[in-house]
C-alpha cells in the first residue's frame, strides 16, 4: 500500500502512532521495551487507517475515532507477538522478534498486556455493540489460528478451507476496522454494512496478495525469507492451485505433506508452484475480491474519501507490489 | 477452602458452572475440547464465589452477577492455560495440561479465546468502570508474570519483591472479584473499597498458604509434585526466610541461584527450608493478612453473608490444610 493513499487521515494516523507509544507505559520496563519494539517493527497501520477512512465519510473531526484506531492496531500487534511464539519466529519485517529477543514468558505476557490496553481504550466508548464486535472478532481470529494449524501439511485442503483461514487471519480485523469506524462515525446500518463488506473483501484481496508475495518477492521486500509459508507447511492459494493442476502434482503432494521435505525441499516446491499457473490464478482471485470491494462503495455517500477507497482497491489488484 | 463455605451462593455457583461450559462453544471443536478440559481441571471457582458473596451483602437476587462471576473465572482460566505454556507444565491439579495434550498453538489461542469470551460477558453490563477494573487488573497480572520471571533463581529477592509478586499473581483478581461483585450489587464507595481490600488481604493470605503447601503438602493433595516452585527457581516466602535466617544459608544461596542445582538438589533445598523457621514465619504472615481481611468486614452491613466471610478468613489462617 502506498503511504499517500492514507493522506486523507495522515494527521490522525500520526496521533495513533503517538498513542501506540504512549499507551504502552507499564511500570515493568521489559514489557515497555518489548511492546515498543513490536510497535516499531509492525508496519503499515492498515487497521487504524481503515477505521479512520471509514469514519471520514461521516465525520470532519476524527478525534473520537483515535482511541478505537489505536485499540485496533494494539489488537493486531497482540496477535503478532503471540504468532511469533507459536511459530518460533526469529524475524518479522526484517527485525528480530520479541520472542527471539525476550522469550516466551515476555512475549505471551506482552501480547496479553497489549490486548488488555486495547480493551481499556475500547471501554471508553461505553458502547456494548462496539465491545461485542471486538470480542467476537477476537474469538474468531483465535479459531482461524486453529484452522491454520489443522490445515498444515494437509495436501487435501481446498479453496474453501483456504478462504476461511485468510478470512480469520486478515479479512476479519480489517472488516471490523471499517465497521467500527463507521459505527463511531454514526453511520446508518446499511452504510455500516457496506463498509464492513468493503473491509472484508479488501482484506481477502490483501491476504491473497501477501500469500503470492511469499512465492515471488525478494527476501528484502518481505523482511523474512521467501517461501516461509511453504517451509512451515502452510499451504496457500498458489500451492492449492498447483496441487490440482500442475503436471507434477503427485511430486508436489508428496513434498508438501511432509514437514521434513517442506523444509528441506522448499526450493523445489517453490519451482513447482511457480511453473504452474497458481500465482496467476491467485492474482485473479485478488482482482475478484477487489471488484467486490469496489462495488460496496456504490452504497456510500459521495465524499472525497470514496476515491481513496477506490484507489486502494485498484492498487491491491494491480500486481504492482 | 471447604466447599460448604460457599453455601450462601451455591445455587449461583452452579449457574456459573453451567455458563462456563455453555460459554465455551466455539465452532472449532479442538478449542471446545481444550477449554472444557481446562474448566474441568480448574478447581474451586474462588473468584466467582467471592464476586457472588460480595454482592450478597446488597442483593437478594444475584442473577445479574452471574455473567461477571463467569467472566472472572474465564479470565483466571485464560491465565492458567498461558502459564502452562510458559512453564512447559505437564500436570495441573492432577490432570494433563492443555499445553501437554494439544501444544502451544492450541493453548495460546484457547487462552485468548477464553479471555475474549470474558470480555464479551463483561461488555453486557455497558459500564465503563467495570471494564476498566478488569482491563487494569489484566495488565497488572501480566506485569506480575514478568516480576516472577525476573526474580527466578535470584537469592537476593526480599519480602517486598515476594509480596508484589503474589499480589499480581493471586490477590489482585480475588480483590477485583469482590470489588466487581460489590459494584454490580450497587454498594456505596466505602463498601466497595472495604470488599476490595478484604479480597486483597484474603488473596495474599491464600497465596502464602499455597506457597507453604508447595513445601509441606503431599503430591496427592497438590496435584503436582511437592517442591515444584523450587525446581523452577521460584523463591517463595519460606525460602526467603531461610535464606536470611537458616544456619545453612550459604549452602542454600548456592543451591537456589543455580537452575541446575534447583532441579537436581530440590530435596536438599526442601530440607534446608523446612529445618528453618521459614514455614512458621509464612504461617504468621498468613495470619497477619487474615486479620487485616477480617478488620475490613467491620465496615460492612450486618448480613448473614458476613459470617461466611469471617469464616473464610479464619479458615485460611488455621493451618488446617
Image (cartoon, coloured by chain):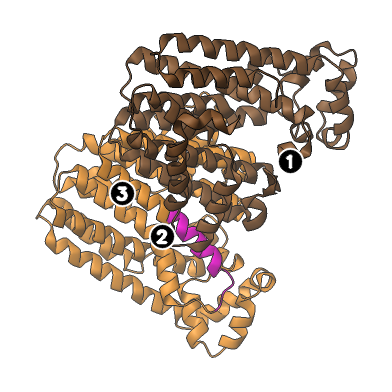
Chain colours: A brown, B orange
Alpha carbon of mark 3 to alpha carbon of mark 1: how far? 40 Å
Which residue is rendered at x = 82% and y = 11% of the image?
A: A245
Q: Is residue B144 magenta?
A: yes
Query: Hey, which quadrant is residue A288 in on the image?
Result: top right
Please name the residue that numbered disc 2 is placed on.
B168
Nearest the viewer among B136 and B318 is B136
Which residue is rendered at x = 29% and y = 73% of the image?
A: B288
Alpha carbon of mark 3 to alpha carbon of mark 2: how far? 14 Å
For residue A224, the mark is 1
Q: Secondary structure at mark 3?
A: helix
Q: Is residue B285 above or below residue A310?
A: below
- Chain for numbered disc 1: A
- Camera-near label (3 vs 2) is 3
- Chain for numbered disc 2: B
Residue B223 x, y percent position in the rendering: 52, 54
Please name the residue that numbered disc 3 is placed on.
B133
Nearest the viewer among A234 and A31 is A31
For residue A192, the mark is none
Amino acid at each position: 500500500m502506498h503511504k499517500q493513499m492514507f493522506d486523507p487521515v495522515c494527521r490522525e494516523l500520526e496521533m495513533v502512532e503517538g498513542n501506540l507509544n504512549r499507551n504502552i507505559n507499564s511500570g515493568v520496563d521489559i514489557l515497555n521495551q518489548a511492546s515498543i519494539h513490536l510497535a516499531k517493527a509492525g508496519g503499515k497501520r492498515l487497521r487504524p487507517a481503515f477505521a479512520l477512512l471509514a469514519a471520514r465519510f461521516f465525520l470532519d473531526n476524527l478525534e473520537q475515532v483515535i482511541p478505537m484506531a489505536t485499540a485496533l492496531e494494539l489488537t493486531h500487534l497482540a496477535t503478532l507477538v503471540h504468532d511469533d511464539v507459536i511459530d518460533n519466529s526469529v524475524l518479522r519485517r526484517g527485525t528480530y522478534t520479541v520472542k527471539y529477543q525476550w522469550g516466551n514468558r515476555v512475549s505471551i505476557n506482552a501480547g496479553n498486556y497489549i490486548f488488555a490496553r486495547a480493551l481499556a481504550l475500547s471501554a471508553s466508548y461505553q458502547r456494548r455493540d462496539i465491545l461485542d464486535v471486538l470480542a467476537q472478532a477476537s474469538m474468531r481470529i483465535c479459531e482461524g489460528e486453529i484452522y491454520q494449524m489443522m490445515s498444515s501439511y494437509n495436501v487435501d485442503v481446498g479453496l474453501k478451507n483456504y478462504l476461511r483461514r485468510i478470512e480469520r487471519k486478515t479479512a476479519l480485523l480489517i472488516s471490523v476496522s471499517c465497521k467500527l469506524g463507521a459505527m463511531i462515525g454514526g453511520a446508518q446500518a446499511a452504510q455500516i454494512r457496506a463498509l464492513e463488506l468493503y473491509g472484508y473483501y479488501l482484506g481477502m484481496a490483501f491476504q491473497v496478495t501477501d500469500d503470492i508475495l511469499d512465492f515471488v518477492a525478494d527476501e528484502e521486500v518481505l523482511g523474512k525469507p521467501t517461501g516461509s509459508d511453504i517451509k512451515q507447511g502452510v499451504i496457500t492459494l498458489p500451492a492449492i492451485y498447483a496441487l490440482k493442476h500442475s503436471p507434477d502434482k503427485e511430486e508436489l503432494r508428496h513434498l508438501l505433506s511432509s514437514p521434513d521435505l517442506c523444509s528441506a525441499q522448499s526450493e523445489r516446491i517453490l519451482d513447482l508452484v511457480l511453473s504452474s499457473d497458481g500465482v496467476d490464478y491467485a492474482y485473479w482471485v485478488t482482482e475478484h475480491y477487489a471488484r467486490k470491494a469496489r462495488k460496496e462503495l456504490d452504497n456510500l455517500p459521495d465524499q472525497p474519501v470514496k476515491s481513496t477507497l477506490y484507489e486502494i482497491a485498484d492498487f491491491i489488484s494491480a500486481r504492482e507490489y
